[in-house]
Amino acid sequence: MPPEVPLSSTLATPLIRYSPPPPSDVEGNHTFKHKSLRGTRKMKLSVRKLIPIFVLILASISILRFVRILITTSSPHPLPASPPHVQQACTSPSSCSKVLTEISGNSTSTPPAYTASITAKEFKLLSNLVKQRRPCNILIFGLEPQYLSLSSINAGGTTIILEDDADKFTNYRTERAGSTKIYKVQYNVPAKEAYELLKHARRSSSCAPGAALLQVSKCQLALTGLPQEVYKTKWDLVVVDGPSGSNPEAPGRMGAIYTASILARAGNTTDVVVHDVHRTIEKWFSWEFLCEENLVSSKGKFWNFRILGHTDPARFCPTQP
């Protein structure tokens, strides 16, 4: 008999440790793609967060450029604190309505009658224009001592000065020389009515450039009571520096600027120079009747417009409807 094997004897089982199989290529690729996807999502989120920042930066740059343009194109000359002129600027008819009807100022405060308001560089602009065209015909609204000096430069030409201030007229009329003539005139429309007159000019066909002769015009802006010599002469240079327009109740320059524009279009080529263009009335009426397209130079508070004669009889500026 074969020997019996005791049941208590155990079988020896080899010890085997389990180690996970190495990841396959597919699983590795899957892990890599998962990590890449997470990175891409993070990148997309970062880009989305940066977009508003870029938009803000671009908007800031645009605003800065716009402000710079406004500063560059605005008048570089500070507005005087006294006397209280019409100092507010307007950029649209609605804003002009508010500005021109709420002009601030003391009606009893007027500048000294004999204070020279023309600076040396402003006078140089005028004298250069006269030298280029002499002998020529010069019409000046407003009497300042420096304007009398233009007569000596304009030898052989004609210079007419229109002044409404009785003191200035009395003081300086004896100083006229040669062919210089000084006329006493009267302006009846106060500066505070500027915007109403502007609306009238836009509505009324009688205010069009070719509507009628100035001396018989029905336009409320036309100065019809000037000396006949003013209407009959072809002017080479017209200077608008009067009336004073120093406060809302004082006569404004609305009619003078309008009349200058009509006289200029009756000639061949006329330089119209407007003073105190830092003030609302002078600036806005120059835009309306002399036109930005005709502005050829500026010096100090002078704007120099060059008007070609016999232009469109229906409108003053090409951009007007």
Image (tube, grey):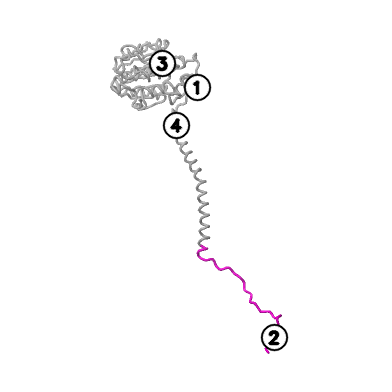
Q: Which residue is mark 2?
A: 4
Q: Is residue 53 above or below residue 138?
A: below
Can you give x and y, in whole percent of width and height, for residue 314 in the image? 31, 21
Packing grade of label 1 (10 A; few <14, some 14-19, many >=20) is few
Q: Are marks 4 and 3 in contact (CB under 8 Å)?
A: no
Can you give x and y, in whole percent of width and height, for residue 247 in the image? 47, 16
Q: Which residue is mark 1?
A: 81
Q: Is residue 22 left or right of residue 143?
A: right
Label 4, label 3: how far apart the Cα atoms are: 30 Å
Give 190 or 273, whichever is nearer the viewer.
Answer: 190
Q: Residue at image x 49%, y 44%?
A: 51
Q: Which residue is mark 3?
A: 243
Q: Which residues are magenta?
A: 1-28
Q: Amino acid at mark 2?
A: Glu
Label 3, label 1: how far apart the Cα atoms are: 20 Å
Can you give x and y, in whole percent of width and height, for residue 73 in the image? 42, 30
Q: Residue at image x 50%, y 64%?
A: 26
Q: Is residue 305 left or right of residue 114?
A: left
> The C terminus appears in which quarter of the rendering?
top left
Q: Earlier in the sequence, mark 4 or mark 3?
A: 4
Q: Earlier in the sequence, mark 1 or mark 4?
A: 4
Quadrant of the image occupied by residue 93: top left
Label 2, label 4: how far apart the Cα atoms are: 117 Å
Which numbered circle lies on residue 70?
Answer: 4
Q: Secondary structure at mark 3?
A: loop
Tell me the chief SS of the magenta region: loop
Q: Amino acid at mark 4?
A: Leu
* Residue 24 part of the magenta-drawn span: yes
Q: Secondary structure at mark 4?
A: helix
